[in-house]
Amino acid sequence: MCLINVEAFLKRESLMKMGKSVDRRTKVLEFGNDEAAEYAILSHRWMAQEVDYDEMILQSCEQARANGYEWLWVDTCCIDKRSSAELSEAINSMHQWYENAKRYPDFRGWPEWFLHGWTLQELIAPSNVEFFNKNWHSIGDKRTLAPTLIDITGVLEHVLMDGLHGNHPCIAQIMSWAAHRKMTQVKTELIC
């Protein structure tokens, strides 16, 4: 799993903003163990246009640091889609990565975020999901927003709170949660 080193990234950004030279040997992206590292994950939803660099990566790193995390995973820069092996591993591992994330903020596209197929696992797998508005103000987490999330998604409360552990719903129930979501095919492109 490729992770962003939050402190290294923010230090590099600060030096560049001040017009100072940056040591190119400083690693911003590093490989880590999703079971050993404590990391946050950013999920986002493109609106009419893509979220720009400053809105997404920089503010995600600032939020991760504010929450005390050294590591951040963002799908758009931590997966090299040129490598079919890496892309395949990411697709097969993503549920586990979301499940192992310590914090998982979403800040763009409420409620559009709920229309896309991939966000179902992003909502269910992590023990906590924190939602932010476009100005990075917290609007709650999946526990405090549970009644609204259950209404929007149809996901059973025990699954929303505890994931797919224990009382596992039947396939038909899981498929009903995905029935009205949009699915898109993955494009092959460079993300790192």
Image (spheres, grey):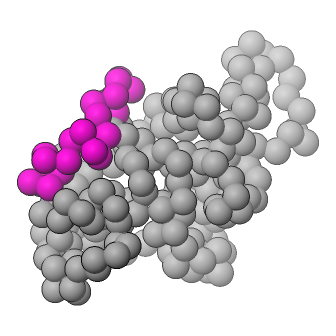
**Residue pictured at 74% horizontal, 13% vertical:** 18
Please give the range of residues in magenta.
132-152
Residue 175 in sight from this viewpoint: no
**Residue pictured at 71% horizontal, 20% vertical:** 14
Q: Nearer the viewer, residue 156 or 45?
A: 156
On whether residue 150 falls in the magenta region, the answer is yes
Residue 105 in sight from this viewpoint: yes
Q: Is residue 58 left or right of residue 123?
A: right
Residue 169: percent from the left, percent from the top? 23, 80
Q: Quadrant of residue 64?
A: top right
Q: Residue furthest top?
A: 18
Q: Is residue 24 above or below residue 182?
A: above
Residue 67: percent from the left, percent from the top? 54, 30
**Residue pictured at 33% horizontal, 49% vertical:** 45
> Is the C terminus in the top left, top right, bottom left or bottom right quadrant?
bottom right
On whether residue 139 falls in the magenta region, the answer is yes
Q: Is residue 57 left or right of residue 182?
A: right
Residue 25: percent from the left, percent from the top? 90, 42
